[in-house]
Image (cartoon, helix red, strand yellow):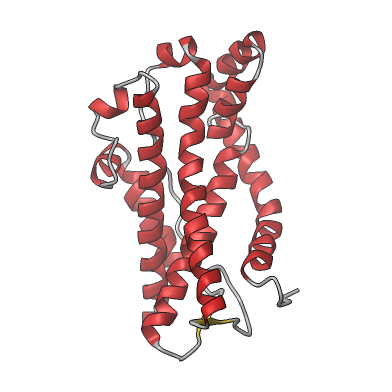
Amino acid sequence: MESRDLTQGLLWFVAFLFSTTVHEAMHALAALRGGDRTAYLGGQVSLSPLPHIRREPIGMLVVPLLTAFTNGWAVGWASTPYDPIWAARYPRRAALMAAAGPAGNLLIALVALLGLRGGLVVGLFNSPKTVSFHHLVEAANGAPWLGAVGEVLTVLLVLNIFLFVFNILPFPPLDGASVLGGLLPERAAVALRGFTANPIFSLLGIFVAWQVFPQIAGPIFNGLLRLVHPHDSYF
């Protein structure tokens, strides 16, 4: 493996670790604000990745490292504990808890987008000849450190938009199903909770989500290109 590939793999892994930690910490904080102290007592109202890694070491370390250094991008998973009795008693609060994780990813993506657009506007970045998931801008003066900043911002933008969209899909056990449950009438919400509690339906939901997401990943990336480079054409 070339040093360039190693650097990109490390970048994707660190970005995944940071973004997933923010996602889970937002879940935990929203649950705490809503009256459920389960995640707080587990130490997960924290931007340190350690409590999240301790809970899901395979999903937070092993799989992201393997995929980052073999595929060039990182995937994995994490989870935040909560009291299911509290969630059933306060479905609106549970829905807010579910929405908080993707909202954290959307916030990171927004900051990264502003950094890229701001850099282009003031002349720190230029539009590159070719683009990819880790290369949306290039340094205007050719400085390696500035190019590295552009790649960090690019990966944070692409990764967090993908995390946001994937997690908001309305299939159990993804966050979107819980958000939807908080918006439905009580009878429908109870039925949905019954579905999400069944491991078979959760596995089915993950399978469907993985089938759906590749179909929309391309259009999502094209939308990001239009946001970063509204006056350029890469199509």
**Residue 162 in view in this figure:** yes
Classify 210 as above or below 72: above
**Residue 2 in view in this figure:** no
The reply, left or right, for residue 170 in relation to residue 90 is right
The reply, left or right, for residue 75 in relation to residue 133 is left
Q: In percent of the image, x 69 and y 52: which residue is there?
A: 216
Classify 157 as above or below 59: below
Residue 42 placement: quadrant: top left
x and y percentages locating residue 128 in the rendered image:
59, 83
Locate the N terminus and report the quarter of the image it occupies. bottom left
Q: In percent of the image, x 37 and y 17: which residue is there?
A: 83
Classify 121 as above or below 20: below
Q: In percent of the image, x 66 and y 53: which residue is there?
A: 214
Locate the C terminus and report the quarter of the image it occupies. bottom right
Numbered disc total: 0
Furthest toward the front, the residue is 122
x and y percentages locating residue 25 in the rendered image:
35, 39
Q: In percent of the image, x 55 and y 41: which residue is there?
A: 167
x and y percentages locating residue 111 in the rendered image:
47, 58
Viewer-closest of 96 and 70? 96
Classify 52 as above or below 37: below
The reply, left or right, for residue 142 in relation to residue 53 is right
Furthest toward the bottom, the residue is 141
Viewer-closest of 133 and 1? 133
Residue 29 placement: quadrant: top left
Residue 191 placement: quadrant: top right
x and y percentages locating residue 97 in the rendered image:
45, 29
